[in-house]
Amino acid sequence: MTGKSVPSSALLEEFWRAFEAKEAGRSSATSGHLVLAAAEGAATLPSALCRFEGQVRARGAEVFSGSWRPALHRPFGGLLELAERLLARCLIDYADVVARYGAVLVSLLPGWEGVSPLQPFSRYRSGLADYALHGNAHGFNEFFRRREVSQAVSVALVRFILDGAAAIAQETGHPTVLCLERVNLTDRLTARTLRKLGLYARELPVVPILSAAEASLDRLEAGEWTVSTAVAENGDSAADEILGYGAEEGAILAAAVFARPFSLEAWSKLLDAGLRAGLPAAAERLLVEGVLLPLPGELLAFTRPGYRDNLEESLSTAERTTLHCRALQTPESGDPFVAAWHASLGALGPQVAVSSLRALEYAWGSSAYEPALALAEVALCRDSSKQPGQPSLAIE
């Protein structure tokens, strides 16, 4: 898949035209922008996006972003990361929107299931998964009934994102921007979901922007998006870099392993005792510089996935392993998909199998079979604790 070659300054102008058209109440002829980063234009894409996001935030609009992370197997990938940030924003001011999609949200984002207004809802369960993982024979009924809820879950997730984004747009008086990066890593179900997102967003005050590597985009419907290929200009740089960590370097780098919105308390649990004193200064600096975004409930998130990714690349393998182990002692572990990811990258042996099977159960419950199979593969490859004759797929 290729698109017209566009330098970063022209990309910025295209983003603004789309934004101002929605601000004027006009519908869009396409689903949004899909920007491809050729190898020589790799710095162009984050530079243009970073400038655009900063400028629309300065105008008073809100931006929600998400990205795909290697080895993090969960339904809808980076779209679910975006949805979680939106959920954190909507819990207080738009509880009615959250409650409207409660069952889907607690199924896909189980770390929030005890929070009002999600307390009354129960997650989707797969009877066949109950049989495979817990020995509940009633699950065979679902096999013969051919239970399949992925499309209903997909539509509900899209409706939650768009309803929440539209409500925020009405509050701010400006369109809400949705940015998704690394969409070339999406699976088939998520590619179909992104198509729904773009189609439904055409009449709403929402501006979707997708970005990806130029290769492996055959799963997306290119004809429905405004497709551009980023071309580098003089002066383009990797705008997501954080320069000059200073005395807070250790504390700043540690935050890169978070996959969910996090609190200062959770952040401190990642740090050695000697680094904790500098944490408030590190957090304040990143908030002032626009690297971190405050969310309701005293939570924080990276403004752009690129900031987090660049920080993570600065960690050594040993540092990364230690931080992923420590992250399991924070609220990150409340999400089984994220817990399985931390256990795997933390090299925690048998715990990887247990965590992956728990995450598999949630993915199966939503009929998200690609991440479920990926989690099953991780569990079966890592599960060396089973005795001969003992079932391989079982949660004790």
Image (cartoon, helix red, strand yellow):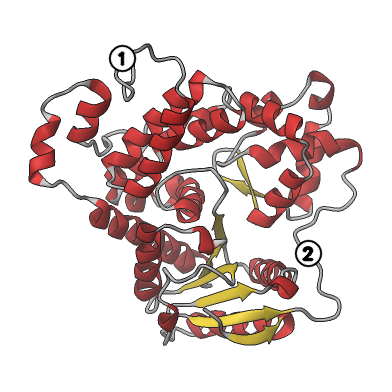
State the SS at label 1: loop
In the image, which disc is placed on residue 89? none
Front residue of 198 and 119: 198
Q: Is residue 251 left or right of residue 162?
A: right
Q: Which quarter of the rendering shows the C terminus?
A: top left
Q: Position of residue 165 (x, y in %)?
A: 45, 63
Q: Amino acid at mark 2?
A: Ala
**Which residue is located at x 45 percent, y 48 percent?**
87
Q: Position of residue 373 (x, y in %)?
A: 37, 42
In the image, which disc is placed on residue 390? 1
**Which residue is located at x 82 percent, y 26 percent?**
275
Q: Is residue 189 left or right of residue 53?
A: left
**Which residue is located at x 58 percent, y 67 percent?**
212
Residue that carries the numbered disc 2 in the rendered image: 238
Furthest residue to the top?
387
Q: Position of residue 28 (x, y in %)?
A: 43, 84
**Which residue is located at x 37 percent, y 49 percent?**
370
